[in-house]
Image (spheres, helix red, strand yellow):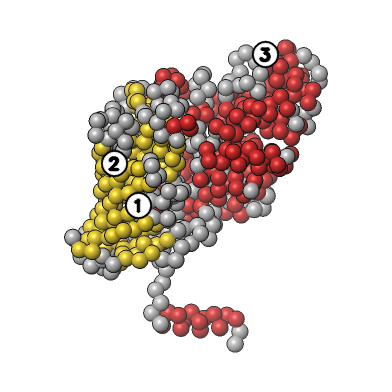
């Protein structure tokens, strides 16, 4: 019997035995929302800093689409104490644990069930939860907690259908220590109360990865009619100054792509251990303090998280294989906002830095690697593996190519309709291809052939029709670098009005084999080692580590001990481990407890 015939016989036998066909769209979730879907959550939990647990009841409203006898949720490390429906106990079981996905929570339900309540508690080592002791905060007096649910970490602090393709609205009651304030990705309080009990409401349906909770000694300050900032008292004024232009950003975004759908846009400034620059939780973006440069020069990150209110939060990738539909659109929108805020040359500086990131990512992964496709294949892998500059920057340059080919006016018309027609829906790559062809490209075959859409999406590397980007300001920086390489005095460089982006370009373009003598000259002239700008420090340390410039050693260790942003940590530990493995291990051992699990998962593979 040949192999094909053998396969067909096996498949026929398997089907005839009544085996259940796997109809899941999202292979990173055990849930089966095509059978039973959660539509609303009433959450009632207590936050316990002593045991580092969240415990309580997740009460779901469900829609039984196919008359199924079981509801399947995702869980990872959760202890399930009891499940009820209609006042009656439900039988339940947890599947065998998968090292990436956790477990499926299978709950027996009656066909007519409308509600299921899960009594549960999280584990002390929940991957989503970062429990900070007072020493790890700005105030040094009170503990702090924040969640990071993206990509599939919501299931480590909440039983849920943890898939971007499943949306639900929610209410919550959260009990915290009386001296702390709780905030969520929902309608929020602005002041503490004496009980330490807070209620929340999110009327718009969101996927589980946008569920967010922060607890700390927080104050709130308005930034405008629809915008505000939460932060520790020691950081509130600095944060309010840095983010003062947020209301203007919101107005610009609305003028381009339609009304903001989430009522308010507030932010929570987190302690430095936050693993990302920002997280676009609806109504409450989580923000890293590493963008507090003192001159508002790094607030393009706020434009990025705000843009997610349309691309990602409003129109969401159906699975994590389609992640570029979130991030590519968001980077495009972010740079359009910054162009309006500043000018075209400013936005082009951001695009050129992004292209450097993209080229470095492709070089690192390999020009023919499948992870350089926009459409990913993350089966049996952690979806976090796909959160690279490919989704962000290759996605951006595809959209910029489309804009340049069909014209900005026509592309903006298309995007307006895209966000409006698909609001509060999910989109996958194949559906997007059909949509953009039907709505935009099929009417202009010449433009369609010039863009080569499917090559960008399904092939590796950077296509040869990638848009060129030029910046007058960066040309001036390039001239300064050339002057330095020729041996001219650094005093000749007119850098007084350089932004963070120009300095970043300067440092990235310096020779990687710069001598200790040259690094000392640069440091004496520009004081890089003592910079208060995290982006500049990160780029500077990538020069000093391979060269062994010891004058920066203490500053490097301080940086690694306090900053938890993975974007910075990964290249620094890679360089440090290559230069001095024992030193890298020593620093990491001391610093690891300050990092979120999202960062340690990446760094453990480098250092341990």
Residue at image location 51% in from the left, 59% down from the top: 99
Residue at image location 40% in from the left, 62% down from the top: 104
Instruction: Identify the residue at the far right of this view.
Output: 487
Where residue 605 sits in the image (x, y, percent)? Answer: 62, 49
| Disc 1 secondary structure class | strand
Q: Quadrant of residue 94?
A: bottom left
Among the two numbered marks 2 and 3 on one chain, the one whose residue lies closer to the N terminus: 2
The residue nearer to you, when weighing 265 against 423, is 265
| Disc 2 secondary structure class | strand
Q: Which residue in the protein does label 2 denote?
A: 174
Among the two numbered marks 1 and 2 on one chain, the one whose residue lies closer to the N terminus: 1
Q: Report the disc number at residue 121.
A: 1
Among the two numbered marks 1 and 3 on one chain, the one whose residue lies closer to the N terminus: 1
**Viewer-side label of 1, 2:** 1
Query: In the rendered view, does 226 fall on the left or right side of 29?
Result: left
Image height check: is 515 above or below 456? above
């Amino acid at each position: 019997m040949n192999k094909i015939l053998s396969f067909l016989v096996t498949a026929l036998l398997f089907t005839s035995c009544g085996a259940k066909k796997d109809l899941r769209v999202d292979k990173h979730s055990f849930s089966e929302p095509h059978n039973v879907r959660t539509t609303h959550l009433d959450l009632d939990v207590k936050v316990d800093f002593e045991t580092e647990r969240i415990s309580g009841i997740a009460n779901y409203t469900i829609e039984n689409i196919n008359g199924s006898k079981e509801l399947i949720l995702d869980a990872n490390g959760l202890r399930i104490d009891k499940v009820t429906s209609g006042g009656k106990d439900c039988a339940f079981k947890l599947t065998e644990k998968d090292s990436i996905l956790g477990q499926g929570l299978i709950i027996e339900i009656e066909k007519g069930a409308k509600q299921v309540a899960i009594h549960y508690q999280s584990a002390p080592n929940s991957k989503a939860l970062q429990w900070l002791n007072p020493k790890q905060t700005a105030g040094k007096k009170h503990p702090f907690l924040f969640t990071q649910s993206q990509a599939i970490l919501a299931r480590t602090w909440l039983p849920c259908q943890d898939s971007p393709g499943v949306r639900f609205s929610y209410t919550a009651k959260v009990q915290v220590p009386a001296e702390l304030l709780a905030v969520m990705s929902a309608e929020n309080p602005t002041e503490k109360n004496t009980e330490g009990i807070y209620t929340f409401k999110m009327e718009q349906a969101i996927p589980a990865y946008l569920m967010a909770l922060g607890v700390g000694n927080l104050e709130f300050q308005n930034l405008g009619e629809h915008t505000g900032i939460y932060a520790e008292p020691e950081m509130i004024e600095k944060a309010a100054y840095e983010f003062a232009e947020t209301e203007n950003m919101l107005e610009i975004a609305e003028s381009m792509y339609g009304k903001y759908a989430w009522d308010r846009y507030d932010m929570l400034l987190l302690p430095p251990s936050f693993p990302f620059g920002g997280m676009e939780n609806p109504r409450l973006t989580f923000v890293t303090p590493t963008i507090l440069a003192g001159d508002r020069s790094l607030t393009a990150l706020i434009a990025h998280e705000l843009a997610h209110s349309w691309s990602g939060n409003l129109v969401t990738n159906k699975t994590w294989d389609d992640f570029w539909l979130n991030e590519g659109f968001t980077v495009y929108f972010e740079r359009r906002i910054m162009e309006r805020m500043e000018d075209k040359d400013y936005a082009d500086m951001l695009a050129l830095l992004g292209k450097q990131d993209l080229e470095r990512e492709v070089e690192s992964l390999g020009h023919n690697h499948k992870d350089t496709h926009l459409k990913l294949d993350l089966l049996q892998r952690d979806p976090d593996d796909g959160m690279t500059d490919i989704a962000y920057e290759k996605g951006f340059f595809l959209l910029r190519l489309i804009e340049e080919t069909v014209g900005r006016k026509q592309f903006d018309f298309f995007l307006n309709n895209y966000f409006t027609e698909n609001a509060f829906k999910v989109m996958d790559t194949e559906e997007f291809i059909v949509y953009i062809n039907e709505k935009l490209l099929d009417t202009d075959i010449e433009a369609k052939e010039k863009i080569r859409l499917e090559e960008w999406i399904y092939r590796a590397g950077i296509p040869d029709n990638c848009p060129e980007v030029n910046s007058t300001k960066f040309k001036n920086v390039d001239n300064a670098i050339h002057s330095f390489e020729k041996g001219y005095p650094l005093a000749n460089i007119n850098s007084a009005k350089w932004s963070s982006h120009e300095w970043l370009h300067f440092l990235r373009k310096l020779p990687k084999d710069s001598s200790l003598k040259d690094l000392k000259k640069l440091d004496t002239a520009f004081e890089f080692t003592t910079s208060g700008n995290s982006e500049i420090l990160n780029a500077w340390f990538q020069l000093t580590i391979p060269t062994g410039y010891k004058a920066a050693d203490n500053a490097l260790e301080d940086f690694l001990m306090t900053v938890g942003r993975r974007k910075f940590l990964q290249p620094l530990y890679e360089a440090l481990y290559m230069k001095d493995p024992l030193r890298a291990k020593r620093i990491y051992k001391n610093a690891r407890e300050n990092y979120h699990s999202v960062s340690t998962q990446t760094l453990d593979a480098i250092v341990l």
